Amino acid sequence: MTTFVIVGGDAAGMSAASKAKRDDPDLDVVVFEKGEWVSYGACGLPYYIKGEIQSLEDLVSVTPEEFREQRDIDLRTSHEVVDIDPDDGTVTARSHGDETVQPYDRLLIATGSEAIEPPIDGTDAEGVYTLGSMTDGKDLREFVARSRETSPSEQPDSGPACQHLERCRGPVGIVGGGYIGVEMAEALAANDFEVHLFQRGDRILKGFSAATSDAVAEHLETRGVSVYLNAEVESLAGSDRVEAILTADGRVPVEMVLLGTGVRPRTALAERAGIELGPTGAIAADEYRETNFEGVYAAGDCAESEHVVTGEPAYVPLALTANRHGRAIGRTVAGTPTEGGGVAGTAAVKAFDIEAARTGITDHEEAREAGFDPVTETIEAKSRAGYYPEGGTVGVTLTADRGSGRLLGGSLVSEYGEGAVHRSHALVGAVTEGVTLAALSNYDLAYAPPFNTTWDPVLTAAKVLDGTL
Ligand SMILES: Cc1cc2nc3c(=O)[nH]c(=O)nc-3n(C[C@H](O)[C@H](O)[C@H](O)COP(=O)(O)OP(=O)(O)OC[C@H]3O[C@@H](n4cnc5c(N)ncnc54)[C@H](O)[C@@H]3O)c2cc1C
């Protein structure tokens, strides 16, 4: 019997396990997960902390019992893999002081990513959090619940977030204006905290276009979140508990700090085994997600992927890639060699009543490095027919290569529910297939007044940028 061993029991690992077992029930599939949770949706944590999702269990798509009993997968939680020996074909797992040596025929490394703790003083004080795991989510929700009961600053009108509220909590600080920082700004402000968001660059949501980032930042401000741009946090002050955030411009008192300064691939275990990393610092893998060792695969947040626009390795740690690559490896191991596919860097974010999406290459420097001559245009258009009773505005930024007219990337923003994210899917198709603006502007997109204008904003943007070229 072939034994397929998987290290890591979340999106990539459990997708691979389930697919392999479904396609070849005779496979012996063994999953080691160092924590207690498997197949959980970390993406839902901000909404759990906000209070929109009541229980952590609601974020779990398949329980450990279901994996074991219904899918016949040998799932071992609380088992940390501490060593991989690719020459012997074994992994060593540790659980409550006991060690198990498990032989494998095929191995998947799906160890995910870990939060980057920025090199600033004071991050080990009490009241400083990161948000990478279910446990982090639980801790943050408990902080919110505790503050509800005890916050000393619970006074009316004590800060900008409180202007429309009867009561206010906080203040709290978020370091980093990426999507987790932005989602958490909403989650905390919705719980009446006075939220201060610090971003060291000149805009939040760096991977999106400047127009999108500015629109989201302005919206956060209108909802009472104080957004500090070009504000590098120098240290966190406080004796045992965090008390303030210090930047070159001053000191902002806080009762809690969330560090949202990005993630890095969790590669230490693979590196010790001689598994090669790529130029991004994540595990290198070919189109079948196989590493430099035959029969050893890598998927999800610990691995890099090929970018569909540049053809170069890229590190885009997001959920669909983890699921897709895990599933492809499951098929391959079960006997049908399957490519994992590339990444376009597609991402979406919501903050209060605004939504945004991005795909492909929008940054000019990045585009030039890949050999393109980038040109960008931004348009604003109505989200629905002008005469239709509801509607808003969609901002579309497109970037294309001057020489070939090829669409390189796009970024969209609209009021929540006005379609920025769903519209981005047309751009993903165009970016992935390498189509030109002329071809995109001839796409036969659906039209009806409640959904868009005859020329959808995406088509209008393509025509405008094509005209510029
Ligand atoms: C707050 C938050 C919000 C997010 N929102 C979105 C979103 O909106 N959209 C999106 O696309 N993505 C989002 N993501 C990212 C998404 O959750 C990840 O891309 C996805 O979970 C990656 O799956 P993975 O299986 O590669 O890794 P992980 O989910 O990190 O799982 C890896 C698992 O491996 C285990 N492990 C690690 N080392 C070992 C070892 N040595 N032995 C045994 N087990 C080990 C870990 O305990 C972990 O359970 C979000 C992430 C967070 C934290």
Image (cartoon, rainbow, N blue to C red):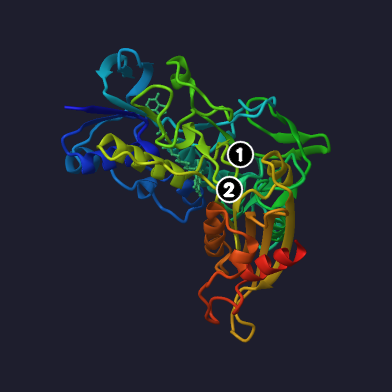
Disc 1 residue type (three-letter): Gly
**Does mark 2 have its CB less than 8 Å from ligand 1?**
yes
- Please state the horizontal and vertical placement of residue 458, each as a whole percent of the image: 62, 67
Q: Which residue is mark 1?
A: 260
Dot placed on the residue nearer the N-terminal end, 2 or 1: 2
Relative placement, left or right, of 466 versus 353 is right
Q: Secondary structure at mark 1?
A: loop
- Categorize mark 1 by other alpha carbons within 10 Å: few (<14), some (14-19), many (20+): many
Q: Which residue is mark 2?
A: 184
Q: Is residue 216 visible?
A: no
Disc marking residue 247: none
Picture quarter with the N terminus: top left
- Please state the horizontal and vertical placement of residue 376, each as a whole percent of the image: 73, 56
**Does mark 1 have its CB less than 8 Å from ligand 1?**
no
The residue positioned 59% from the left and 84% from the top of the image is: 389
Q: Is residue 101 visible?
A: yes
Disc 2 residue type (three-letter): Met
